[in-house]
Amino acid sequence: MKIWMILSSSVVALTLTACNKQPATSSGPQAAASAERSPAANKSAEGHGTGTVTAIDAKAGQVTLDHSAIPEAGWPAMTMSFGADPAILSAIGVGDKVAFDMTTANGTPKITAITHQ
């Protein structure tokens, strides 16, 4: 009986300890603040890529590209949106194959130049 009580107490103590642990990843304001302080989130980069225009939102100043890898930025091939000036947006259309120069500042990607391929 004494062993049973000791084992039961140990299981209860371990269970309570496990319940009070913080998760390995979190969300909410603390996670957002932590991400903003991380070097990767604030890293600036310049790079060159090629891709296909999949969407243009002139009102928002955004172009979405399905692009090849951009090694200078450490990015694999993917589809993503970039900010772009109106002059750049007016020179391209959905479906165009393009080569582009880009930059990131505080994690925000922007097309700085674009040409048709």
Image (spheres, grey):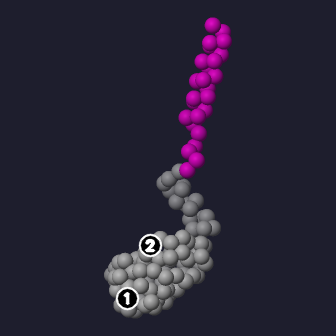
Predominant SS of the magenta segment = helix
Residue 47 horizontal/vertical position (percent)? 57, 82
One can see residue 63 in this view? no
Cβ–Cβ under 8 Å for marks 2 and 1 = no
**Residue at (59, 72) in percent of width and height:** 74
Q: Which residue is mark 1?
A: 92
Query: As rendered, which of 16 and 54 lies closer to the eye?
Result: 54
Mark 1 residue type = Ile
Mark 1 surroundings: few (<14), some (14-19) or many (≥20) residues within 10 A:
some
Q: Is residue 33 above or below residue 90?
A: above
Front residue of 109/78: it is: 78
In front: 111, or 18?
111
- The residue that appears at 50% across and 72% down in the rendered structure is 77
Say which quadrant the N terminus sits in. Answer: top right
Identified at 61% across, 78% down, the residue is: 72
> Which quadrant of the structure image shows residue 43?
bottom right
Report the amino acid beneath label 2.
Met
Tell me, yes or no, if residue 43 can be seen here.
Answer: yes
Find the distance from the CA under tag 2 to the CA under tag 1.
16 Å
| Image-based side of 100 in relation to 90, left or right | right
Q: Which residues are magenta?
A: 1-25
Residue that mark 2 sits on = 80
Most distant residue in the top direction? 1
Q: Is residue 10 magenta?
A: yes
Q: Position of residue 78 (x, y in %)?
A: 47, 71
> N-terminal of the two: label 2 or label 1?
2
Q: At x 66% / y 12%, what residue is drawn? A: 3
Image coordinates for residue 36, horizontal then vertical, percent? 56, 65
Q: Secondary structure at mark 2?
A: strand
Instruction: Please say whether residue 43 is one of the residues in the magenta stretch.
Output: no
